[in-house]
Structure formats: structure tokens, C-alpha cells
Image (cartoon, helix red, strand yellow):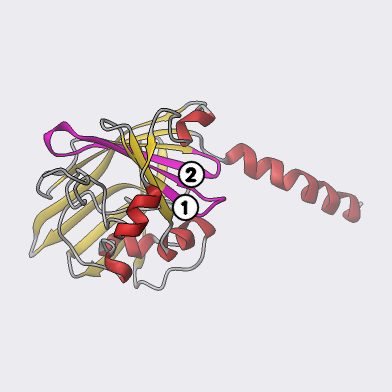
């Protein structure tokens, strides 16, 4: 009987895990940084994450994270262009569940946000003190693919370095539904989910449209940008102010 139960667990385990995988959209609002995107939408499907946002002067952009290929594709939606580059080691670690090296205090404080159980994390970084409420029911947060917040540190290769709170949850397999950063008691940054919707997403959402121009080869020759073209903290499009 014990052997039969062990076999059933082995057979059903992947099915249970698959059934628990979230598919749908997470809408978030950011405040604090200059020219912060008014809204951001994360679309999540097993093996993929897509981030859509509006930047300065109404410019629209998206990022597709493809975990099987360990690459991300930056979409310049208004210009119908895209470029593809490798994921950073931190993004790969976040998706694989590798342990984070950043120091973070995990508290016993729990809160339900938009119907999802969240655990509170607290981290001290150069940006200040961040309180992060994150859930393990929505997959892993892979970051912004080049900070949409503007400014900040630079990592290897000149890429925009993640904020301290992003580093703190890397590899923990959680998604933040609320982040509040304060300096000397004053709030300087807030990222908060406003809606979570379970919905079946088409596979086409996670590939560049056929009529978009691929700039990957040209941009690699020039040096890939450190952020999202035309958005706060991002490089400008070639030939544009």
C-alpha cells in the first residue's frame, strides 16, 4: 500500500503543481519616482511573463520574458519595433528559485491583498527601508527588465541595477502586491497591485507581432540599451531626441 501511495504522489504531483500555476493579469500602480508609469500590467502564463506600461509623453512599451530561452524581448509598441536580449543572472535566479544573496528580514506578519495571502518582508538598502508584501500564489517577480523608475545604480554591462527591494525577493518565488519604501519616515516609493484577474491568455501575447521590425542585430552592434527605449530610465530610440 505504501508503494502504491508513493507512486500516486509521484504521478499526481506534477498535475497538482500545474493546476496551482497562476495564469492571468496583475495590474499595478507606481508612485514616487519622477515620470513613473501611471499603470503597469503583468501578464503571466506558465514559462512567460509580459509587462506592459506607458511612459513619458504617452509612449507605450512592453517586455516579454521567455524563461525557456532565458531572454527578454523589448517591444516599442508605437514604433512597431522590438529587440531581444539575454536575461540578467538575477532574473534567471528569480525564475529558477535560486536563493537570494540579499539580506532580508522575513516577518510573521500576514495580510490578504486582493484575495491573495501575503507575507511581509523588510529590507534595508541604499534606497531606504522597504516593506514588501509578497505572495507565492502568482509566480516569481522578474523585475522590470530595465528600471522604469529612472535614475538609480548601474549593474554589470551598464544595465540598470535593481532596487534593494527587488534584490531582496530574488529567488524566493514570490510576487510583490505592495511595496513601500521610506527614508527617515517619509514615503519615497510605492508599488501596489490594484487588480488581479485569472484569465486564459493567448500564446500570441508572448511573441512579437509579425509586422514589428526586429532591431536586435543592429542594437547589439551599437551596445544594447540599459533600459526601455522611450521610457523613464531607458535609452532613446535611434535617431530620436
In the rendered image, the vertical position of residue 107 relative to residue 143, given as above or below? below
Q: Which mark is residue 137?
A: 2
Number of numbered labels in the structure image: 2
Residue carrying label 1? 71
- Disc 2 packing (10 Å; few <14; some 14–19; many ≥20): some
Task: Please tell me which residue lies in front, 151 or 127.
Answer: 151
In the rendered image, the vertical position of residue 223 relative to residue 42, given as above or below? below
Q: Helix or strand or loop: what does disc 2 sit on?
A: loop
Q: Which residues are magenta?
A: 45-72
Question: Residue 175, can we see it?
Answer: no
User: Which residue occupies 17% across, 47% down?
Assistant: 232
Q: Position of residue 147 (x, y in %)?
A: 25, 53
Q: Position of residue 186 (x, y in %)?
A: 7, 57
Marked residue nearer the N-terminal end (2 or 1): 1
User: Quadrant of the image for the C terminus?
Assistant: top left
In the rendered image, the vertical position of residue 126 relative to residue 234, given as above or below? below
User: Which residue occupies 48% across, 44% down?
Assistant: 137
12 to the left or right of 230? right
Residue 54 is one of the magenta-drawn residues: yes
Q: Quadrant of residue 213?
A: top left
Q: Quadrant of residue 20?
A: top right
User: Which residue occupies 34% across, 68% down?
Assistant: 105
The reply to whether dot 2 and dot 1 touch (C-beta < 8 Å) is: no
Amino acid at each position: 500500500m505504501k508503494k502504491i501511495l508513493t507512486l500516486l504522489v509521484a504521478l499526481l504531483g506534477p498535475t497538482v503543481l500545474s493546476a496551482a500555476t497562476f495564469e492571468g493579469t496583475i495590474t499595478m500602480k507606481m508612485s514616487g519616482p519622477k515620470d513613473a508609469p501611471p499603470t503597469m500590467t503583468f501578464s503571466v502564463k506558465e514559462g512567460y511573463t509580459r509587462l506592459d506600461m506607458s511612459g513619458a509623453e504617452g509612449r507605450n512599451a512592453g517586455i516579454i520574458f521567455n524563461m525557456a530561452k532565458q531572454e527578454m524581448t523589448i517591444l516599442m509598441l508605437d514604433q512597431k519595433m522590438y529587440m531581444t536580449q539575454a536575461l540578467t543572472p538575477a532574473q534567471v535566479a528569480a525564475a529558477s528559485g535560486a536563493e537570494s544573496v540579499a539580506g532580508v528580514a522575513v516577518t510573521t506578519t500576514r495580510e490578504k491583498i486582493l484575495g491573495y495571502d501575503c507575507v511581509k518582508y523588510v529590507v534595508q538598502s541604499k534606497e531606504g527601508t522597504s516593506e514588501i508584501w509578497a505572495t507565492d500564489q502568482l509566480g516569481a517577480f522578474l523585475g522590470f527588465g530595465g528600471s522604469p523608475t529612472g535614475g538609480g545604480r548601474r549593474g554589470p554591462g551598464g544595465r540598470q541595477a535593481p532596487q534593494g527591494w527587488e534584490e531582496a525577493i530574488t529567488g524566493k518565488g514570490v510576487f510583490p502586491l505592495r511595496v513601500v519604501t521610506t527614508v527617515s519616515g517619509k514615503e519615497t516609493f510605492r508599488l501596489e497591485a490594484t487588480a488581479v484577474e485569472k484569465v486564459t491568455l493567448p500564446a500570441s501575447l508572448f511573441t512579437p507581432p509579425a509586422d514589428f521590425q526586429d532591431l536586435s542585430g543592429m542594437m547589439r552592434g551599437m551596445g544594447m540599451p540599459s533600459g526601455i527605449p522611450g521610457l523613464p530610465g531607458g535609452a532613446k530610440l535611434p535617431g530620436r531626441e
